[in-house]
Image (tube, rainbow, N blue to C red):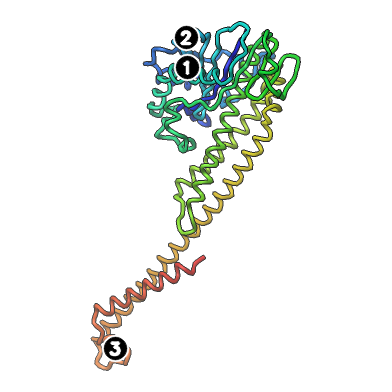
Amino acid sequence: MTNIHTYSPISLAINWRSEICTDNAIRLQELQEILNDCSDISIAGIDWPLGYGDLNHDNLPLFFQPVAVISLIEACLEPDIKQADLYIYDDCCAVAHIVFADIANDSPNDVALSKRTEEIINVYAKSVCQTVFQATSRQAFIGVNDYVVMKSLDNIALQHGRVLWTARTHIGQADWDIETWLGEYHCSSDYLRIGSGNSWLINPSLGEHFHRVMLFAQYHSAIYSQYESMLNTSLNAFNRFSQQIVMKDSDIQRHQTLVDHLDYININYSSACYGTQSTRREMLQHFQNSWQIDEQQQRIVKLAELVQQRLQRLKQDSLRQQNKITQGLLGFLGALGVIGLLFDLKSFSHSIDDNSPIMALLADISPDVLLGGAMLIAMAVSLLVYRNHE
């Protein structure tokens, strides 16, 4: 018999003020209010034991705690579906968990499973995706129009719940060629095998432990994938700006906030790993080693450092440009002072009988010519100051 579970991170327009609102109950209440008119789902809080207690507890920071689980009720009416849930997290990521009906003596078809998972999400999570996409900001919830860090995400993907990928797991003993299905696996313990996209939990009694770890691992990997994409988008944006065009301060601040928030995620991930206990910690280490999480994290950190360096240069360019403008304005104001002096001298030249050559010249020049010449001199002085200031 096959007992297949799929775990699929999806893009979803649910974004929280995690660094400000630290009450998960408020987030759950707001989500229930937003989705109140969706009749084909049920929403419940997570009943996992969190904090420090016995070994069944995990001390997870708020960012890595699921806010709620949304059950896709009508999806379970499909003959091949036992269970279909969305686990809601932060930063526009959710993880879909689907349990397929048992099929006797049949090796799973990976492509068909992934395609079927995507079909279930597209059909039965549609109302959730579109409702949260249209929702406005609240105390903890951030509406799409108010995104800062997530502003560069694809709105179409958010609106339709785009599936990032699908991981497949078989739980329990198998009477089919599961080794071939796993392919080359990177973890081999007494109770777990982890391959590339497929995994096998040999001991079904560890199913709840595995489920919690798999959700955590999938969410973290999805966040890293998402931030790698956004950091690359930032680099592409930087490349569009030459020395003659300066990026707006608001855009610089948005990219800076992105880098800062990534630091926040890394700190919380370290805390979550430390707070995971018992068999779940060992499972998490297996996933980290198999998926080369440390190498991925180092790559993202280096990419963030590159973005930070570009940001620093952009800030310096912006400051230098502002200084040039300031110096140019000061030069123009100084030249205006000279213009005022020339007109004072011209007026004075008409009030004396014995003009010197300079006074005579000023007296003979018409006001229009004097004003035009003085303005040209003022603009020339301003331009020279502007171009020569570094």
Q: Is residue 77 left or right of residue 264?
A: left
Q: Is residue 60 above or below residue 257?
A: above
- Looking at the image, tell me whether mark 1 or mark 2 is earlier in sequence order: 2
Q: Are marks 2 and 3 in contact (CB under 8 Å)?
A: no
Percent coordinates x, y for residue 234 in the rendering? 52, 44
Residue type, numbered disc 1: Ile
Q: Nearer the viewer, residue 382 or 203?
A: 203
- Corner quadrant of residue 178: top right
Q: Nearer the viewer, residue 217 or 342?
A: 217
Of circles 2 and 3, which is in front? 2
Q: Residues within 10 Å of mark 3 (few under 14, many from 20)?
A: few
Residue for point 62% across, 20% down:
214
How far separated are the C-alphas under marks 1 and 3?
A: 90 Å
Residue type, numbered disc 3: Leu
- Looking at the image, tell me whether mark 2 or mark 3 is earlier in sequence order: 2
Q: How many marks?
A: 3
How far separated are the C-alphas under marks 2 and 3?
A: 99 Å
Percent coordinates x, y for residue 244 in the rendering? 46, 59
Q: Nearer the viewer, residue 224 or 315?
A: 224
Q: Are marks 1 and 2 in contact (CB under 8 Å)?
A: yes
Residue 120, which numbered label? 1
How far separated are the C-alphas under marks 1 and 2?
A: 9 Å
Q: In this view of the protein, can residue 126 be seen by the observer? A: yes
Q: Is residue 6 left or right of residue 279?
A: left
Q: Give the residue number, with chain letter if any, for mark 3.
A: 361
Q: Give the residue number, with chain letter if any, for mark 2.
A: 78
Percent coordinates x, y for residue 103 in the rendering? 58, 7
